[in-house]
Image (cartoon, grey):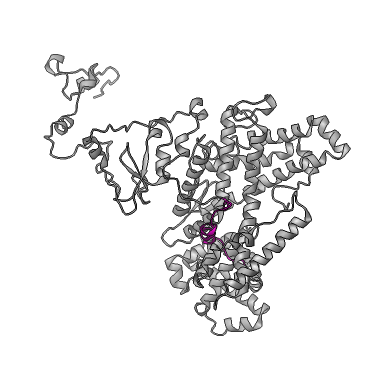
Amino acid sequence: MAVNTSSASIEPTSQPDESPSGNFTLENILGTNHEAVEHPRLKERDSGDATGPGEGWDEESAVRPAADGFCVECEDQPAQVVCDTCADNYCEVCFAAQHRKGSRKKHIAKPIPSGATVQNGAAEDAKKNGEEQDLDDVDMDDSDEELDRISVEASKAPVPIQVLDAQPTVGSKVGEWFVDRSKYIPLRLTYGERKYLRLLDAALQVSEYTDKIDTLGFGLSKPKRIVHQIRELCAILSGLVLAADYKQGQELFTDRDFQSNADFYQTIFELGRRHKIMNPDKMRTTYGKLIYLLQDSQSPDVRDMLSFSCVKPIISVYTILEENDALDMLRDDLIKVATQEIYSEGRSRREVQRDIKNKERAIETLASKYQRSGLNQEQVRQCIYSIGDNHAFLRTNRDPCEKMISYLKQHFHPTQPKDNKSSLAIRSGKQGARLSHDHAKQYAYVLQSLTLWREILHDMFRLWSLAEQDLLAENVPYRLRDTGQGLNRVQAAPKTFRMMHTILHRAQQSVGTWIGSSAIHMGDHNVPNALMFIDKYSQIYRILLPICNTLSQIPSLAEKPALRSYIEDDFGSTDNCVREILCDFFQHGFDGSGADNFFDAGSCIDGRLTSAWNWCAQLEKKRYFPVFLLTGFVGFDGDW
């Protein structure tokens, strides 16, 4: 029997006067007075008659507070501050993230005394004392008024994150600055170690490790393939060592056992990792194979089959000095003179020579003063030279960010452009832009992006150390997935991710406000693992350094009459030429472009760098591209 459902209707069977207005019935729920309807269990809970806690389909069945002494937000970091208004414990990063905007921005945090534990349930005590609890929702509106107002509270936070300055301040004790930095500064390779480094690089060049391991469908199981490839690489290394040094090679082939030579292979692999951190431009194709090989070797199954571990800690300046009880060298006042970089720009030859002699004298004084029974003078010099290498790394990688920030402040007004050519405003859909910002918002957006890059590069060695710890962790497995850019190892990076949150918090404190998204991609299809993260941010100087070199050489180009005529005819003046290059880069190098969708680029932390790379790819189409060529520009992947 067919039923005609088209004409069927639901008629309430009870009359309105038979159902009180507050009863929990279908008629009252669908009626006009539905706001007065209450669930029976809710009434029991309010009256105290309920036998258990009220739970609903959209409520958590059990709300477990964070453990005492830990942050209520992330629950894995020690609590450092307590919010007087929220009465909750936070670590500094989570407090800044949760109290960045809206009514919570006015909340005041107090440091938790050392050794004391503030209970997360202190809100009840505050209510008993008559304090009003303002737990309103956070206003997330990005209005122009919010952007124009600089956060005074953020810059005057009661408990700022304890980070060291970019360099020791004049007149201050430099000891702790150098002690903290030396923990993440790898020791420079000696001449003998460089010989083995070349052998490792040669073996990795011919290895097909990733081609045979990171594939879908193969004859042998993955652990057996990994063990086979690791042993093959170790065999190649042994053969190369035998060819280069017959005596050393004979020692390796005495037992013909990989396990007995574990120390040798660990040392060889550690040399490659240490060299790569100190020289990001080197081993660009082989470091990935090396780190993936070591990542696989940390698997329990593979380690059992190999019977030895391929990984050993990186040798740093701090570990060498600590083992030989010579850390006081880093607190010596001469350490700053011995590790300083000597610049020749704008200085006389006599001044430069005087600084060179002072530096050499300081190095020799420290080497003779802090030599020990297990630490000779040459090793002390290696430690000092390694710290100097760190300074050179910062000058090459971090200082271009400083220069671009100074260009931004010098040529553009923070809120009002001088004319249309000085406006940084962008509109979505125009010239490939994915964001819509007025001049003031784009100025702040560019400033905070450059500030964030500067902070990342300042702590790059620490980030690299944490990234290797995440990559080589035994308890953090990876998954081989197609991320849209081929098969990649998707692996979580908790230590690197946490450090990035700390750096982001520091950048937010520095600029006072934040434009766009603060999402950090790590362990997803955008940034699959910590190795991709490190590789991504180690390329920043490749973008900024050629631009800075070009801008600095434009005035010298104008000294030649023919080139000055070209610049004046096309741009009006050298200042206009510099301003046009900067304006275009600040506009379309930070416009959210460079990806297939908004979520992969846009205004997130990693999307800003994607937009800058997209601008680099479009440089040949710019009308000022000949100016780059005249200054010796050869590309963003060359030597300068």
Front-lying residue, 492 or 109: 109
Residue 236 visible to the viewer: no
In the rendered picture of this protein, how many numbered marks are placed on residues? 0
* Image location (x, y in percent) of residue 502: 47, 47
From the viewer's perspective, is 361 left or right of 118? Answer: right
In the rendered image, residue 333 lying in the magenta stretch gets the answer no
Above or below for 439 versus 209: above
Residue 625 located left or right of residue 73:
right
What residue span does the magenta drawing correspond to?
A: 166-189
- Report x, y in % for residue 29: 22, 22
Residue 186 in sight in this render: yes
- Compared to residue 497, the image places residue 608 above or below, namely above
Taking the spot 64% from the left edge, 84% from the top edge, the residue there is: 247
Residue 169, above or below 450 = below
Q: Quadrant of residue 385?
A: bottom right
Q: Is residue 172 magenta?
A: yes
Q: Position of residue 622 (x, y in %)?
A: 73, 35
Identity of the residue drawn at 62% across and 53% down:
394
Looking at the rendering, which quadrant does residue 235 occupy? bottom right
Q: Nearer the viewer, residue 573 or 26?
A: 573
Q: Position of residue 243 (x, y in %)?
A: 67, 78
Q: Main secondary structure of the magenta part?
A: loop
Residue at horizontal 58%, vertical 37%?
447
